[in-house]
Image: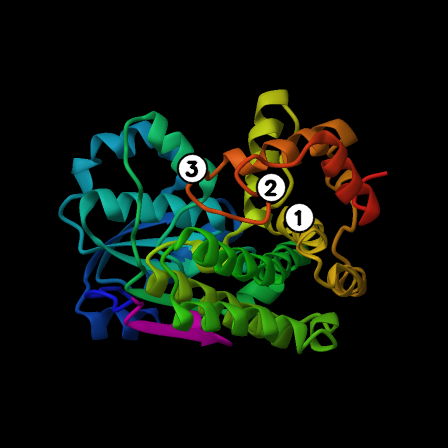
Amino acid sequence: MVKGLELFEVPRQVVFGPNAISKVSEVLTYLGLRRGLIITGHIHSRHIASKVSEQCVDCQIISDDEIELSDVVKGMGAFSNVDFIAGVGGGRVIDVSKVIAYKLGKHLISIPTVASHDGIASPYISFLMQDDLSKLGMGKVKKTPLAIIVDTGIVAEAPRVFLLSGIGELLGKKVALMDWRLGYRIRGEDYSESAAMLALSSHMIVMNNVSELTKHGEEEARIVVKALLGCGVAMAIAGSTRPCSGSEHLFSHSLDLLAREYGVKQAMHGMQVALSSVVMLYLHGANWRRIMKIMRMLGLPTSFRELGYDRELVIEALMNAHRIRPDRYTILGSNGLTREAAEAALEHTGVIT
């Protein structure tokens, strides 16, 4: 079948490596941007945001905890005169920045201080934030960063748990691609070979550099950042999160929703995705033991109990996972798993006891 016209946006400029933060002024000048609103977090991120602000012609800094999603949905008209929105911080900061840039129709500059997930380069926001926005009457957010600036020195200095989360996110791409091909074959879903190859290459960057990822430091950060950037571009080309989000993400999102419902502290996204991937590879009949071995080598959690989740919550989450995105076909099928099948998969892989 001949495809029709395709249109996608990718970042115009990407700068990553040691001392990349010093290049903000050059990037803004190249892009012709002057007035900006910088969204950031606390303490460490705020310090980095100040360095960014010093390189702007006219920038204002706001902490993400000062911003309610309901205010964003209403428009934040007070900032309509800026040229760009810059997110300087972790996952929530980057997501909030995307939402504001999307709502105001402004350019987005992504300046992550951690490499914990692939949202640093993708047009999309987290499942939970999109769910919250949908409840407030806002549609799907899609905002590709015009530029991405990642200082690997800053990323390497952050607590290693963030980098491990990013590695976990990347380990899951194998499952996402297997599920995407399944959806293409069974339901005729749109499929992009180029997007799939990009996502696969990001996964393989981790798989081929396990020994380097055991050496804590800037090179480890560079490897993870490079792979996460590839994922972001893959999603931009595909026009959806499909190349990077399959049944492993459905399981993780299901865990998030139940954790909220039961008042349980949510674990880091990438940690959940890594463990979920082990289960989904088992269901696919693929080599899940190799992923588990790598997780042990790198120090990622190998059981849901280590993430603070009890047995019943995990089983319920797996049984409900297929309901998260019924429009996407995965190894979970249309009807999901029975309790017996869910328990068997979780116990056989050792992720619950």
| Side (left or right) of 178 relative to 26 | right
Q: Most extreme residue toward the top, as rendered?
A: 262
**Is the residue 268 above or below the residue 10 in the image?**
above
| Side (left or right) of 351 relative to 182 | right
Q: Which is more N-terminal, label 3 or label 2?
A: 3
For mark 1, give the secondary structure.
helix
Residue where numbered disc 3 is placed = 129
Residue where numbered disc 1 is placed = 276
The residues colored magenta run 10-22
Q: Are marks 2 and 3 in contact (CB under 8 Å)?
A: no
Q: Which of 130 and 20 lies nearest the eye of the viewer?
A: 130
Q: Which is more N-terminal, label 2 or label 1?
A: 2
Q: Are marks 1 and 2 in contact (CB under 8 Å)?
A: yes
Quadrant occupied by the N terminus: bottom left
Reply yes or no: does residue 267 show up in magenta. no
**Is the residue 109 above or below the residue 139 in the image?**
below
For mark 3, give the secondary structure.
helix
Badge 3: few (under 14), some or many (20 or more) residues near its Cα, within 10 Å? some
Image point 49% across, 61% down: which residue? 181
Q: CA distance from mark 1 to mark 3?
A: 20 Å
Badge 2: few (under 14), some or many (20 or more) residues near its Cα, within 10 Å? many
Q: Most extreme residue toward the left, as rendered?
A: 81
Residue where numbered disc 2 is placed = 251
Label of residue 171 in the image: none
